[in-house]
Amino acid sequence: MPAMNLVQAITSALDYKLADDPKVLVFGEDAGLEGGVFRVTQGLQSKYGERRVFDTPLSESVIMGAGLGMAVAGLRPVLEIQFCGFIYPAMNQLVTHVARMRNRTRGVFTVPLTVRLPYGGGIQALELHSESMEAMLAHVPGLQVVIPSTPYDAKGLLISAIESEDPVLFLEPKKVYRAFRQEVPEEPYRIPLGKASVVQAGTRITLVAYGAMMRVARQAVELAAKEGISVELVDLRSIYPLDSETLLDSVRKTGRLAVLHEGPTSFGVAAEIIARVNEEALYWLEAPPRRITGFDTIMPLPMGEHHYMPTPERVLYELIQLHNTAE
Amino acid sequence: MLTQFDPLKGKRLQILDEEGRIVSRKHLPDWADEALVEAYRLMLRARVADDKALQFQRQKRIHTLPVNKGQEAAAVGSALALRPDDWMVQSYRELGAVLQKGGTIRNHLLYFKGSEWGSVHPGHPRLLPLSVPIGSQITHATGIGHAIRYQGGSEVVLCYFGDGGSSQGDFHEGLNWAAVFQCPVVFFCTNNHYAISCPRSKQTASATIAQKAVAYGMPGIQVDGNDLLAVHAATVAAAEHARSGQGPVLIEAFSYRMGPHTTADDPSLYRSKEEEEEWAPRDPLIRMRLHLEGRGLWDAAREEEARAAAAAETDVAMREVDELNETPVDEIFAYQYAQRTAELQRQQAAYEAFLQWKEAR
């Protein structure tokens, strides 16, 4: 089995779907010849031709709107928005049309569309190149939001996303695009959308994370173990649909909950998870849950972003506080 | 033909004058007498349904809705250029075109009473639901055209929007992409001279909307939008152009919104009676009726019969819609995704528990 980094695993999924289904088209700004600014689509145009894999005009709104038109006409477009922070010109199309088409036509017209979005900070990038806006996207009824953390999950989730009958926003943690390799089968496989994964069992605290923060979480869990705190780590993988069942099972076991993400605190994914736990498992909680997140601030430029991005030490600090909170 | 009306030189295609006389035979559509009569009947049907819908709104049987009056030739003349397998992407003021494409008066009324089923037409024609965000539908037409070209099809897309829509970024993005990839789309701008209260003169400094086509590298043509024959001739030529793989075309139909923007609008706040009176004789129905009468194809009795038939159809449709009163709870949750999520099931169950409690109280 080959070892792949996250970029290679995503390319492998796109490669499979392009070969598998002539309805799949891959496009975006610089996504054709160059293979995208992160080279995720590299080699696909030369393999499948310019009709299947192509560069678009620099126009996010029509990338999304034309994607909808293609989907309605029977194709399965996989479009790339170059950075999550550039999605705003396409938000009107996404919210007013892509998310609503199935409902407003009672299923006559559907939008099996996948939007690839490199997201997240910690890469010393330019302004608007580091945002983590998954909560805003997940708030829109009709959309699905998926964020892989590993090469293996990325391939299986992306294949499922492209095969989904409804639009999927597939957020790619660019901080870990090339951070590590993992054994990834050459053959296609699918990981269902809306299913979280318990990646490490533990007894005292449930720590929920996703995307690039999973790497931070793993390090924090190791540090915590050295302090004698056993942490169960859950990789959310899908933001919407949210896998309440897995989260609740874990919290009922550990009695303590922390949620880690790099997006802003207020109205974020952590807030939603804690609300669900409060509704369904409040009496299993032995301490108030904690949010370990970015701040309600504009993402700082590179000289300040280390303060904004949660680090393993900051997570450890929060885990210790949570662990020491009396019942 | 598309090259003979240079929009940069202020040319405009007209075939019928206001008295219904043919002023130019060169581009006269190849229509049998019967087809001419049918086209007029469709305009009339749309007009009557539109007028009656306004009354129904005043009677509170339906809610706020846009008014079509004055734009029937633009809608019908263009829609009649489509093959059954072609696509139509609507704005929301093309009732005649929607009826031609397979929509129904019942559905028109049902949508504006407040049901999503109003966008679901018998046999599911290739007709997108109306688009509320102005101009946003232009990019959808581009994408459908892209898919047709990719799949090697011979269909075209007819995409409606207005002079207001031409100011949106999506107009630029959609036309630009369509021209780059030579998508088979007929972009049809019904310039009715108003975006709610904002007149065409404040919408763009361009002399015409048709001339914007030049910058995108596609043919553009301005037609008299109240002249059914001119609209049809231009759309047939544009559709042929697109169908033959030569890419998109922009048509500007020069027309006038004779009624309010919607039933909630009061045009007296922003335009003069004199202006409205100036446009009144240019009503697209008058011109076509005079033309048909001049050719012995129409008379007062037939007019009365056709109007009565359209009125009866609309009344029947309204009564049918009157009977439909509530969207079932299940439907609200059923069409969000292909499969209902666990969270949606939970929310639905919680709401239904409340309803049961309310019922039992």
Image (spheres, grey):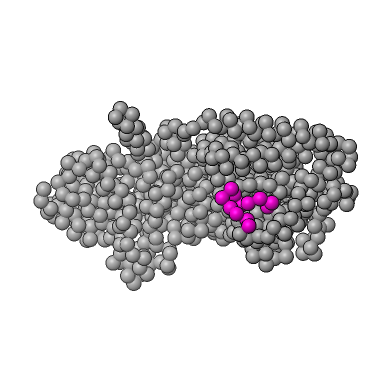
A231 with respect to A120 (left or right): left
* Membership of A226 in magenta stretch: no
Magenta-highlighted stretch: main secondary structure? loop
Q: Percent from the top left, x then y, of residue B226? A: 76, 50
Residue at x 36%, y 35% (from the top left corner): B348
Up the image or down, B202 lies above or below A287; here it is below
Up the image or down, B19 lies above or below B113; here it is below
Residue in front for this viewpoint, B233 or A27: B233
| Residue placed furthest toward the bottom | A303
The reply to whether residue B124 is visible in this rendering is no
Residue at x 82%, y 51% (from the top left corner): B18
Up the image or down, A182 lies above or below B114; here it is below
B296 with respect to A221 (left or right): right
A35 with respect to A234 (left or right): right
Q: Percent from the top left, x then y, of residue B137? A: 59, 50
The reply to whether residue B40 is visible in this rendering is yes
| Total residue callouts | 0
Residue at x 87%, y 48% (from the top left corner): B21
| Residue placed furthest toward the top | B360
Q: Percent from the top left, x then y, of residue B187? A: 68, 51
A323 with respect to A262 (left or right): left
Residue in front for this viewpoint, A173 or B170: B170
- The quarter of the image holding the N terminus of chain A is top left
Residue in front for this viewpoint, B210 or A151: B210
Find the magenta span and give its range: B257-268
Q: Percent from the top left, x then y, of residue A69? A: 58, 46
Residue at x 54%, y 56% (from the top left corner): A61
Please tell me in which quadrant of the rendered image residue B223 appears. Answer: bottom right
